[in-house]
Image (tube, grey):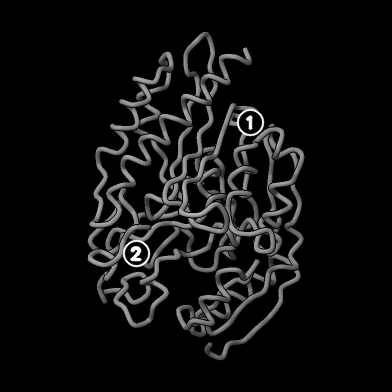
Amino acid sequence: MNNFAYSRADDATSALDLISAANGNGGGKFLAGGTNLVDLMREGIERPSAVVDVTRLPLDSITEHNGGLRIGAMVRNSHLAANALVRQRYPLLSQAILAGASPQLRNMATTGGNLMQRTRCYYFYDLSTHCNKRVPGSGCDARNGFNRYHAILGTSEHCIATHPSDMCVALAALDATINVESNLGARSLPAEGFHRLPGDSPDHETNLEAGELIVSVDLPASTADLHSHYRKLRDRASYAFALVSVAAAVKIVSGKLEQIHIALGGVAHKPWRALVAENMLVDHIPSAKLFEQAAAAELASASPRRYNGFKIELARRTIVDVLSELTSESTKSQ
């Protein structure tokens, strides 16, 4: 681990001032839960000149906001998953968080930190390999290496890493909004557009600007109280990253899908919003045949590598199964 300056911020203004000064002197990082950043620093992958600890910022509340919920960036994942309003109105988010990591890590991880975690690609973590995400322009050994856990959608010749978060997949499906602040002002980004596909610059993983701090996440009223489910397929039952995951939420009115929200995990460099499938399904009567067609259409652009072609069929079957279960439950409850 390289030497770095450490400071602790007590409010957002001081945090932004400290990171601005750090970015003008070699580059700084915000420390939230630390469950990913500290590991990367220990391995020599992240080498910030300064670390600004934001764990004491007063951003740890969950409140009702515009008919939905506002989640502070410092809310611990364990508290978020257990919150009564989240479990009642947005159970998809609670399910996704509980499907990830271990209880100990969820007790440390924060909402903002989870959004900023980096890939768990072996080649990214191995300093002896070529990785464009770690060293831009060096190549991508994963493309012709052991790529069982890698992406099949939205890949590029420069990177096939997957995004590791379960929480972020649920946020994408729920049309969440990420609120950020900097010394230049405040702005909001849709969760679906917060993370980036690799393209020519896989080292740029989010659409945050330099010096921006995540302050909260908004869950809208429009996706509250929907029938929803998060299903995660993995090699072992606990503490494993997704091979494929599906976050889905539906609303059926007069026998038709009035709302349909689907996001996939484990298949792309970012949580993958299944817009092709959604557009095929909305305003239609749900059926297994239609789900099959929509899932196939969504996955038609998949570009598998040697060891991960199975993800196409796994994702197709999981999408169909989750939607069949959800629509059956929704119809029975009416």
The residue pinned by badge 1 equals: 224
Instruction: Please tell me whether residue 58 is drawn above or below residue 228 in the rendered image.
Output: below
Residue 45: numbered disc: none
Measure the C-alpha gap from mark 1 to mark 2: 33 Å
Instruction: Indicate the secondary structure of the residue bearing disc 2.
Output: loop
- Mark 1 nearby-residue class (10 Å; few <14, some 14–19, many ≥20): many
The residue shown at (32%, 73%) is: 131
Task: Residue 254: give x, y in percent of width and height.
Answer: 52, 8
Q: Quadrant of the C terminus?
A: top right
Instruction: Please tell me whether residue 80 is drawn above or below residue 59 in the rendered image.
Output: above
Instruction: Please tell me whether residue 135 is drawn above or below residue 176 in the rendered image.
Output: below
Task: Residue 124: give x, y in percent of width and height.
Answer: 39, 72
Left/right placement of residue 233 relative to residue 68 reads left
The residue shown at (53%, 85%) is: 49
Q: Which residue lies furthest to the top in this view?
A: 254
The residue shown at (42%, 21%) is: 282
The residue pinned by badge 2 equals: 202
**In-front residue for pair 306/267:** 306
Instruction: Indicate the secondary structure of the residue bearing disc 1.
Output: loop
Kindly tell me whether residue 190 is visible in this rendering: no
Task: Residue 12: give x, y in percent of width and height.
Answer: 69, 65
Left/right placement of residue 108 relative to residue 228 reads right
- Mark 2 nearby-residue class (10 Å; few <14, some 14–19, many ≥20): many
In the rendered structure, are the residues bearing label 1 and label 2 in contact, judged by CB atoms less than 8 Å apart?
no
Left/right placement of residue 55 relative to residue 328 reads right
